[in-house]
C-alpha cells in the first residue's frame, strides 16, 4: 500500500494532524536554531486556543493518535528532526486540542558525555516513545513547557 493510499485512509482529524506535523517539524527545527527554544515555544503558545472546555474523555486515545502522526511526519517528512523538535511539535499539537500536555527534558551522563532527551507527557504518561525515558534519563523536576491554562482555570 502506497503512502497516498494510507494517507487517504486516515480519518480527517488524523490527516489534519499529520499535515500540521509535516509543516511544523522542519519549521520548528529551523526556528530552534534561529530564535532559540524559549522564544519559539513562546511564539507557539500564541497559537494555542485558550478554552474553558475540559480535555475530551478520550484524551489517551487522541494523545496516542497525535503522537503517531508526529512520528509518521518525522519519518516521512523533510530532514530528520531531533527529539526536541518532535516533542515541541507534539506538545503544541496536543495543546491546540485542549490537552494539558507537558514537555519534559532529562539528562544522563554516558561515559564522558552529557546526553539530553526531550519527551511529552499527558496525564503523567509518556507519549510517542518506545522506551520509558524516566528509566534512562533524570528528568528536570519541573516541565520545560506546559499547555497554557484555560480561561476557566485562570479565573479561579
Image (cartoon, helix red, strand yellow):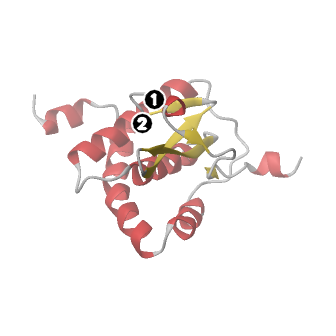
> Which residue lies most toward the right here?
156
Can you tell which mark lies on residue 28? none
Q: How crowded is mark 1: few (under 14 residues within 10 Å), some or many (20 or more)?
A: some
Q: Where's residue 109, x and y in %?
A: 48, 45
Q: Where's residue 82, x and y in %?
A: 35, 52
2 sits to left or right of 147 = left
> Which residue lies most toward the left here?
1
3 w.r.t. 146: above or below: above
Q: Distance between the residues labelled 1 and 2?
A: 5 Å
Q: Residues within 10 Å of mark 2 (few under 14, many from 20)?
A: many
Q: Which one is in front, 115 or 143? A: 115
Rendered image quadrant of residue 85: bottom left
Give SS at disc 2.
helix
- For label 2, the residue is 67
Whether residue 98 can be seen here: no
- For label 1, the residue is 64
Q: Where's residue 113, x and y in %?
A: 42, 52
- Whether the residues at callouts 1 and 2 have beta carbons within 8 Å, the answer is yes
Q: Check the picture and name the quadrant holding the N terminus.
A: top left
Amino acid at each position: 500500500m502506497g503512502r497516498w493510499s494510507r494517507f487517504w485512509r486516515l480519518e480527517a482529524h488524523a490527516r489534519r494532524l499529520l499535515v500540521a506535523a509535516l509543516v511544523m517539524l522542519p519549521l520548528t527545527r529551523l526556528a530552534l536554531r534561529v530564535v532559540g527554544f524559549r522564544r519559539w515555544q513562546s511564539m507557539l503558545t500564541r497559537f494555542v486556543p485558550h478554552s474553558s472546555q475540559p480535555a475530551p474523555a478520550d484524551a489517551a486515545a487522541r494523545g496516542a493518535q497525535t503522537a503517531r502522526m508526529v512520528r509518521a511526519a518525522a519519518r516521512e517528512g523533510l530532514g530528520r528532526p531531533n527529539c526536541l523538535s518532535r516533542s515541541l511539535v507534539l506538545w503544541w499539537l496536543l495543546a491546540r486540542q485542549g490537552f494539558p500536555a507537558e514537555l519534559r527534558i532529562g539528562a544522563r551522563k554516558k561515559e564522558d558525555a552529557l546526553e539530553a532527551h526531550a519527551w511529552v507527557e499527558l496525564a503523567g504518561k509518556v507519549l510517542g516513545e518506545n522506551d520509558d525515558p524516566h528509566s534512562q534519563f533524570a528528568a528536570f523536576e519541573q516541565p520545560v513547557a506546559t499547555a497554557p491554562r484555560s480561561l476557566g482555570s485562570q479565573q479561579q
